[in-house]
Image (cartoon, rainbow, N blue to C red):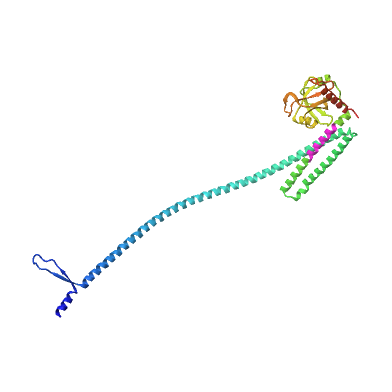
Amino acid sequence: MVRARGIHEQKKYFSLMLVPSYTSGKTRSIRISHRSIYAVLFSIAAIAVILTLLYAQSMFTGRVARYATSSLEVAQAAYANLQLSSSQELSLLMDNVVFLQNSLRAERLRSEEGLQQQQYAFLETLEAIWLYTEGLEMRLRGYEAYRQEIITQLSESEHIPVVRNLLVNIRQSEEDLLIGLDELQGFSTISRAGYDEETQLIYYIIKLEAALEAQHVLFTELKEKVDGAIPYILRDRYGPDLLEWSHVRNILPRNTPVMITDVRTGTTYWINSFSHGNHADVFPVSPEDTAALHSTFGGRWTWDTRPIWVHVGERKIAASINGMPHGGGGNRGNNMNGHVCIHFRGSRTHNGSLGHERDHQRSVTEAYRAGLRR
């Protein structure tokens, strides 16, 4: 029993053999209890766990610190960029404010200038209307004097039906014009009172333009009617002279405008004579004279002949003209290249064409007989 208990007690300890001492030569052993061993091992394990946790914590703290540092740098860079952007935006905003102020100032100046220009334009318009009115009155006075002169001349031949009808038409036209002028005067003094200034101005301009247009039409009609009656008036007063070419070539002026009357239509135009050979070579003075000559031949150039009167001083001479420009001379600023020929009694052609000479002489005879009193 005593041995067994000793064996059991030995198992509760760990025996640690020590190195023998070289001096004594004895071996020593140390007994350590199981609990002590376990406590030491547990302490070592605990210390290792604590050291591991501290290392892990230090590593985590380092990563957090590095992340915080990088985040702080990014935040600082973003803040710097924000400050720069804010400064740029503020500068741009100030520039926009200055530009807007300048634009408003310029727009205000333009508005003031626009109002001044409108005022000037309005005053100019009023002045133009005044000049229009004065011009209209002057032209109407001129028309009245011209009308009285024409009526006086026509009244001497009023027994001719064409002239009598012309006088009736002139008087009717005069009445229509007077009615238009009365309406214009009434508008100027009364009817404008019910409108504002701008509307009055517009209406007044319209009335003036209408009156001027009516006057222009009246002048045109009067000229056409008088031109149509001229052959009858001249025929009624005195007949044309039937002069030989040998005499006419000495009294017909060269390079001096001479009036021509087309016997059949009463159309008048002007010519210059530059050569007096077998007949007179002539050309119209202006483009309008060329157009008038062209119209008497039905708007076409032709070798046909027409009876005419050539006015030399106080005389008119029976003659004939052809309607085909030919020969030299070029365009003398009258829209016609070349010249045409005027024949008188006894004149000849250059090429000896007897047929063409007979045509001219028949037209000379027609021109002479057309002026005889009926």
Identified at 74% across, 30% down, the residue is: 287
For residue 26, what is the image quadrant?
Answer: bottom left
Whether residue 21 sits left or right of residue 210 in the image: it is left
Q: Is residue 351 left or right of residue 102?
A: right
Q: Start and end of the magenta stretch?
A: 214-230
At 73% from the left and 48% from the top, the residue drawn is: 199
Instruction: Please provide percent x and percent y for residue 89.
Output: 49, 51
Residue 86 position in % (x across, y down): 47, 53
Please report the residue visible at 82 percent of the width from the left and 35 percent of the height from the top: 224
Using the image, determine if residue 303 lies above or below residue 125: above
Q: x, y percentage for residue 214? A: 79, 41
- Image label count: 0
* Principal secondary structure, stretch drawn in magenta: helix
Instruction: Reply yes or no: does residue 7 show up in magenta.
Output: no
**In this view of the protein, can residue 149 be seen by the observer?**
no
Q: How far across and down, in percent of the image, does residue 296 sit?
A: 80, 31
Q: Nearer the viewer, residue 108 or 303?
A: 303
Is residue 286 positioned above or below 35 on the image?
above
Query: In which quadrant of the rendered image does the N terminus lie?
Result: bottom left
Viewer-closest of 284 and 176: 284
Please state if 230 lies on the left or on the right of 98 as rendered: right
